[in-house]
Amino acid sequence: MHYYESCSCNKNQSSIKSRRARQKEVQKSRNVMQLYHRLVECVAGLGELVEMQRLTDGIVLSLSSMGVSIFFVENICELQLAALKLVTGLFSLYVPHRKLIIEDILASLARLPSSKRNLRSYRLNTEDSIQMLTALALLLVQSVIVLHDEEMSVISSYQDAMRTAHMFLSAFLKKSTLKGEDDYRMIFENFVNDLLLTVNKPEWPAAEVMLSLLGSLLVQQFNNKNLDQPTRVASVDYLGTVASTLRRDAVNSQLRERDIDNILRQLLQGDGDEEEGEESRELRSQCHAALGCLDRVQALRDALVDYLFAEQEDPTAIYARRFYLGQWLSDCTKEGEKKSEQEALDLAERRRAYLLEKAAERYDQWRSKRRNRWNSPPDLFGVVFRGQLDYEEACMVCRYLASMRPFSQSFDIYLSQICKLLSETSVPVRTKALRCLSAVVEADPDVLARKDIQSAVHSRLLDSSTSVREAAVDLLGRFLLCRPELTNRYYPMLAERILDKGVSVRKRVIRILRDVCLEQPDFPRIPEICIKMIRRVNDEEGIKKLVNEVFQMMWFTPVRERDSVRLIRKVMNITEVVAACRKTGYDWFEQFLCNLLKKEECEKVRPVERACKQIVESLVETVMRLEEVTIPSSTEGGRLLACIATLHLFTKIRPELMVQNTLMLQPYLAIKCQNANDVHIVHHVARILEVSFLAQ
């Protein structure tokens, strides 16, 4: 009894201890969370203090060091968002500390969390997310712009932003391409993908600039033959990613002028004009007239600035607006220097004056103007917007405006650089360049229609390296099927490679040609393809097996009864191949068909035998149709011979297939032999009748 009481007592004590431990753990967790929230408030308060109070260099160093270190710890997203404001504010206001902050960030990259779960924790306006590191880098570049009253000061700050972006990118790229630094390479790849994700988003104008600078850096790096091979290969890889994404975006989001006109019309009319009436009709008439004489570029810039002003509570929008205005002013200055026509100079000057006016505008002035927009007098361009962009429209406007800037127009430059690398002496560089070209073609298969690409691919099909030739063949194989119009153009150079000295290349070519036969049955050179593949039947064992599989799939797979067109096409291909192989003999065909039928002897389901019956029946029908022609031509005579020769082959292997049709062929024994075709017809018919009779 005492034993059971002792056990019960021990259990109760254990339960009490575990409950207390859990309570302590919960209390500890609660205390940690309270401390965490206090830290978030503290860092957020420091971010506000930076904007309110001038600080000493020592304090700035301490704050920047603390702020940067926060970005390299996992699972503290709220704290990182607060640090984002703090570090960006310091970077914007304290020019001498900018280089130190960037060096601190780059030196800390090795501590960046590698967990994929927490990799992209900064949420964009869309469903996408990016790394906190990317958001920080973009905001730092955007924060450099300061809107002064003097135009040259604004342009100078924009140039500083370019230098900042270049300094960060060049140092980051150098780290990522160092030998053995795979972790840095992964971080940089994610960074590049983030830039491609944020480009043409209204809050991130620096993404387009950084990608443009990155493209130039990559071209310089892989053209520098003094660098080691892995560095050059990595640079080619990054440029391929940028070029393919650039092309994909161009294909997927081709903006029509009508789309932009619709956006401008909605901005001019506002949201309250759906009701019919004299006033609304008059307003629409005015809008239509305004669209005709509108400076579209400046109107869209104005609409984008309005959109960002409306998002004033978000620091990202503030820096984005400043960056856009600095960038556009810089562009206007360059345009004014390039243009020689007076009209173009006047337009550039008007835009410049308008942008300076916008740069000087404060939030309260803008809000007052928006509040009174229905009664506002026309501005410098004679336009008053009564509506406002939503997020999707803002993205469209960004894409339209970006289409006139260097990055959007750099695809041809990048593609020509990739093609240039196809002639490099280094095999890995050539192979990587082909893979990059493949990624570009995947984004837009129409690129293969370009003559320079056709020439580049052809030269790599003749490359001295097997891996390069295989990559070139693979490139064609992936995209010819989705662009049948290109098959005829690339077929001759592809067909040559069926004789390639590399086994892997020959196999890949045979698979591509098989797919062409199956997916593009109307391609006129299918019989020629079949003949080329048949000639590889005595190749090495792997290719011999592949050829047998190809023909079993193409010819000896039963066709549905309803699909008569496919059956007729298949039979025509077989007869044309048989006719073409007459001089070389049919031993391969006979052996191949015998092996296929032998495999099925013990099977209940015999698809090859069924396919043979379908082929023979179709051949008999074709012969009967040709009989009805009163004056046969030489072409039809050749077709008749090919059909009967094919029937002879099938009869030799499986005589039962022709037993029921022998009477139909007997009259051919009595024809007058006027040429070689007639002699061959009589020979084949006699052999068919002989074999069929013996099989009965």
Image (tube, rainbow, N blue to C red):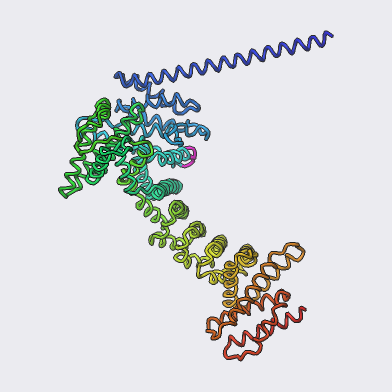
Pick the quarter of the image with the N terminus: top right
Q: Position of residue 320 (x, y in %)?
A: 33, 33
Q: Is 571 displayed left or right of 336 in the figure?
A: right
As drawn, 623 above or below 65: below
Q: Dividing the picture into quarters, in which one does residue 451 lie?
A: bottom left
Where does the image place residue 142, in percent across and percent down from the top left?
33, 33
Is residue 557 or residue 624 the one in the foreground? 624
- Kindly tell me whether residue 235 is visible in this rendering: no
Q: Residue at x 61, y 14 (%)?
A: 23
43 over 135 or under it: above or below? above
646 relative to 500 in the view: left or right: right
| Residue beneath the point at 45% across and 17% down | 38
Q: In the image shown, does 144 or 303 lie closer to the viewer?
A: 303
Measuring from the top left, give residue 550's x and y in whole percent: 61, 64
Residue found at the very far right of the displayed protein: 1
Residue 680 is drawn in which quadrant?
bottom right
Magenta stretch holds residue 459: no
Residue span colored magenta: 179-183
Report the front residue among 18 and 69: 18
Is the stretch drawn in magenta largely helix, strand or loop?
loop
